[in-house]
Image (spheres, helix red, strand yellow):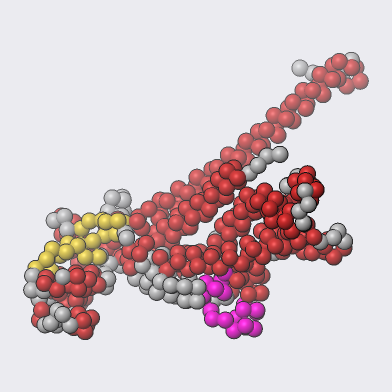
Amino acid sequence: MKKQPENTLTPAQKVERSLKKRYAAERRFKAFGIASVGVGILALLILFTEIISKGSGAFTQTYVQLEVHLDADTLGIYDATDPQQLAVGDYNAVIRKALLKRFDGVKTRNDKRALYSLISIGASYQVQNIIEADPGVIGQTQTLWVLADDDLDTYYKSLSDAEPFVGRLSEKQLEWVTSWVEFGQLKRKFNTILFTSGDSSEPELAGILGALMGSLFTLLVTLSLSFPIGVAAAVYLEEYAGRNKFTDFIEVNINNLAAVPSVIFGLLGLAIFLNFMEMPRSVPLVGGLVLTLMTLPTIIISSRAAIKAVPPSIREASLGMGASKMQMIIHHVLPLAMPGMLTGAIIGLAQALGETAPLLMIGMVAFIVDIPAGITDPSSVLPVQIFLWADSPERAFVERTSAAIMVLLAFLITMNTLAIWLRTRLERRW
């Protein structure tokens, strides 16, 4: 239908046409908003699907059933009460004898080496723990489920796929694995090693406990420093500092610091704490100090917003009753502003937990196997651990990387949920 010229329309027709345009624009605007939310949800679903599909396998580990004869001569342990003999016992030897007994056709040196490589070096620690727990088992034959090597583990987990991942396994090794599968001598168990061990160059022995403890100590240092300093700065700027160019200058720079890339804080920490103060590398204390510098602007800004939200009538009533300004702040303003302050602090700490760049700058990227016991012990943190595993060539580290990301996401979601709960639980509406 031909559109009627604008100059021939009546006022009522012009209004009706204008309304149609506005309604159409509103529908388009609404559609763009829905499409944006949809894109965000789709990206989130793809992210979670990718991470969960790759990382779920890391929560189980393959074990091999072996009949192990704990022979004293083979172990080299003749006095089970002697800790020295228990410490230096040849536990690998009994496992190798069990493997050769299971596959008695293996004779050549290369075949033996290939057969031994299907079992993790951590299996010897299993045997050692069993003997240390009960020395009376020496001389007995026990049916043990020993830890498999990462190549066997990866292959066994992919058996249900259309094309199982063979990796570095040879044809002979595949025959031995197939024999174990046929006789039901392979099974997957929950991977407790992932949560009870530190890092390792062997994927099947690698865990995240060391990185988790390092992250915990780092966050404790960050919280204990950034929260009181940030709140004190916010109280001074809001309640005591006069409005002049100097305070405006400080306010502008605090807002700018909140947007500075985190790697800059890493460079600052490197210059101050390591180069000038000569503090040790790769310790949670230095990591916490660097993250404190990064988190402080966020806490100051959120704390100032929470203090501003307290109605002036509360302050005036308190002062009117004879309280000093400090009493007014401590007894009235801070308790009422605390929910907002805590929410800002938790969100700032959650952001700090996921940071990697500033920690890389201060050397928290070292390969550390031990579990840290304090803030001055060398340790890694979870984001850096993920970075290290993602850079490892072994395929088994791929699923462990995704599993570590899942743990980190769970930690971040928990902290953000706690922040929302605190806000809704403690918030007062005026």
Most prominent secondary structure in the magenta stretch? helix
Q: Is residue 285 magenta?
A: yes
* Left or right: 152 in relation to 50: left
Using the image as rendered, state which of residue 17 and residue 261 is in the foreground: 261
* Left or right: 363 in relation to 428: left
Q: Is residue 112 visible?
A: no
| Residue pictured at 27% horizontal, 56% vertical | 189
Using the image as rendered, state which of residue 257 and residue 264 is in the foreground: 257
User: At which x and y percent is residue 385?
Assistant: 46, 67
Quadrant position of residue 86: bottom left
* Left or right: 147 in relation to 351: left
| Residue pictured at 40% horizontal, 51% vertical | 53
Using the image as rendered, state which of residue 201 and residue 395 is in the foreground: 201
| Residue pictured at 16% horizontal, 70% vertical | 134
User: At which x and y percent is residue 61?
Assistant: 29, 59
User: At which x and y percent is residue 169?
Assistant: 27, 66
Q: Which residues are magenta?
A: 270-288
Q: Is residue 85 magenta?
A: no
